Image (cartoon, rainbow, N blue to C red):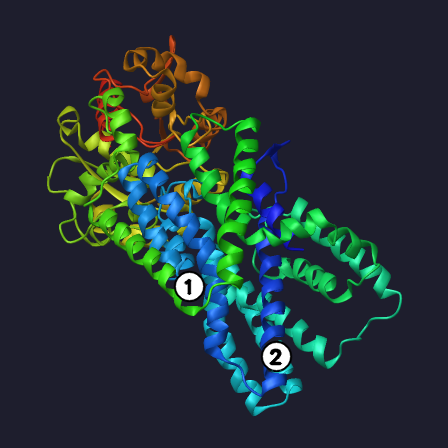
Amino acid sequence: MRAVAVISVMIYHLKLQLGGGVLLAGGFLGVDLFFVLSGFLITQILVDEFSKTGQISILQFYWRRAKRILPPLLLVMVCSLPVAWFMLLPSELERFAYSILSALFFVSNAFWFFELSEYGAQSGLLQPFLHTWSLAIEEQFYLVFPPLLIVMLRCWSQRIALFILMGCLVLSLLAAQWLTQEHSALSFYAPTSRAWEMLAGSVLAFLSRSAPNALRGGLLDKIIPSLSLAVLLGCIVMLDLVSIQHPGFVTIPVILATSGLIWFMAPGEPVTRALSAKPVVYVGKLSYSLYLWHFPIFAFGRLREIGTPGFVDMASWVALTFALSITGYYLIEKPFRFRLSVKPFAGIVTMTLVPLCLLCALIISGTIAPTGKLKNLAALYGENEIDNTVLAQASWGPLDALSPDEDIGSWNALRASETEKTALWFTGENTRKVLIIGDSHSKDLFNALSLNSDQFPNTEFARFNLHRKSLQADLELLRAAPNFAASDTILIAPRYYREYRTALATMLSALKGQGKTLIVAGSTAEFDVGGAQPLFDWYLRQSGDAAALSKLNTLAPKFEDPVARARNADIQEIAEAAGAGFLSRRSLICDDSPKACTIVTPDRLKAMYDDTHWTLAGAKLFGQRAAKAGWLTSAP
């Protein structure tokens, strides 16, 4: 069963394209299978210990957990650190150091929730230690569960303890479903939303003692294992994390199927024989090492590739994962787990932990800086900033300068700042007052226009953030803002997602009849080449020649997202039907005659720091083009 879980997770993280989706879209459910197995095995060990001795040794329990968890984890960290130092950019290396520390202290579920919830965060597939969130949840559970189990077993019978655990399971499931509906990302990483899965295993462990033959001995023995495996594999093949509310009620079939396999498998039964085959069992023994190694190898592999990784690349990642897992299993995992006594184990672990934590602290403090990648790319990039995170942070600078009491950053793409909600930015009496509203794309357009304010005479600009997931509430805040009351022109400039028709109609309906001139800015040009780098970086690294940038703008149309481009006609139609004006943001970037899109400015600087957002250099150029095109020249 461990083999099924880990192979499913590995294939899911490869993201092998299949039709319009990926192979094993529900492979992430392998982690849920692990949680049930863990709850079953750990509880079984603890209850057996209590039945034999009348007590549970907490120290022995955590000693066993340390032997199981730490040696392979530290091995992967020690091997990954020099690779990270050589490959990662400054912002990436700092995040990597934080991720190491959060994994060591088993709080990485919280760390990655906050890190990946930040707007514009780098893809999770490029974070070498993202997968340690599940280890953190397990260890958090096992900080609480054994002491509570001791109290229950001392105060009540195992039967009552079983009912208490069943009640906790139901409460955790209900809490998971509620939280998933309210905040799916938080629920995914929350230990409370995963506790019911481990408690399902715990309940099975209690039942295996109090009613070991329940439901067994009849037709169910023949039906349930095959049915459970079919349900489990069906969910792993078909369920898509984006389209389901997980963890919650939709996860119940996976947990029941896992429980069915645990309960009904027996010697001689066909599914049991299949899962007991020596190769499958061997992969199961390697499962912890495979889980630890695969994600950093896959992440570093993606970071190393220029463009989209191919099948050969992914096959080499898998081969390396198995090679390192097998090596680590025999050289580190087995000896540390079964042969070393307390003193040598503690000595070796301490001698590894201390320098590892120290190195991470030095990286975070800036004392140790990445050199490998920077040295290799510095000459190639010339005056261009290599680290796109730095460019992204700089793009919030103009708004930050207008907000002396706030530190404006990417969070301002998710909610309005206090300065936007309460301050009046407009100061002139006889000026046109343009309020630009939307998400981070409105920030880009604000930069473009405000950085060229001298080319828009008698015009002032302000900005207010609206987020599509809190649109109604944000519109209420907008209408109460001083800048809204003072403005005469509202320029709507968000990124247009799948629900853009409804969102745009909502905005136009809420703002119509307010005595404002309404103008809708169409979608910006968006580009995608696959892989980890945006178009500029992908092309520069692929060519290896800065002189080749002169050709990039004419090649860029081949990589433009046709969906974003096609939406502009629909957006214009919606705007005009509502009596609003329309301005084409795409025309500031792309010229269809001759075909060219500006990825490189005339000064040979990046115009975009990712697939959709403008750098300050790009915004400055696009604002100049807007002025030349006669934007906002008519009277409000």
> Measuring 40% from the left and 41% from the top, which residue is drawn there?
508
Task: Locate residue 500, reporting x and y percent.
Answer: 47, 38
Who comes first in sequence, dot 2 or dot 1? 2
Question: Is label 1 in a helix, a strand or a loop?
Answer: helix
Task: Locate residue 248, reporting x and y percent.
Answer: 58, 61
Q: How far apart in space, not on screen, are marks 2 and 1 (Cα)?
A: 27 Å
Depth order, front residue of 468/143: 143
Q: Quadrant of the N terminus?
A: bottom right
Q: Label 2 amino acid?
A: Val
Depth order, front residue of 430/33: 33
The residue most toward the bottom is 155
Task: Locate residue 593, reporting x and y percent.
Answer: 38, 9
Would residue 290 be found to the left or right of residue 496 on screen?
right
Q: Label 1 amino acid?
A: Phe
Where, by quadrant of the figure, is residue 163 drawn?
bottom right
Above or below 590: residue 462:
below
Q: Quadrant of the C terminus?
A: top left
Would residue 120 be found to the left or right of residue 485 on screen?
right
> Measuring 81% from the left and 72% from the top, which residue is drawn there?
215
- The residue indicated by pointer 2 is 47
Crowdedness near tag 2: few (<14), some (14–19) or many (≥20) residues, C-alpha within 10 Å: many
Q: Which mark is residue 345?
A: 1
Could you tell me if residue 412 is visible in this image? yes
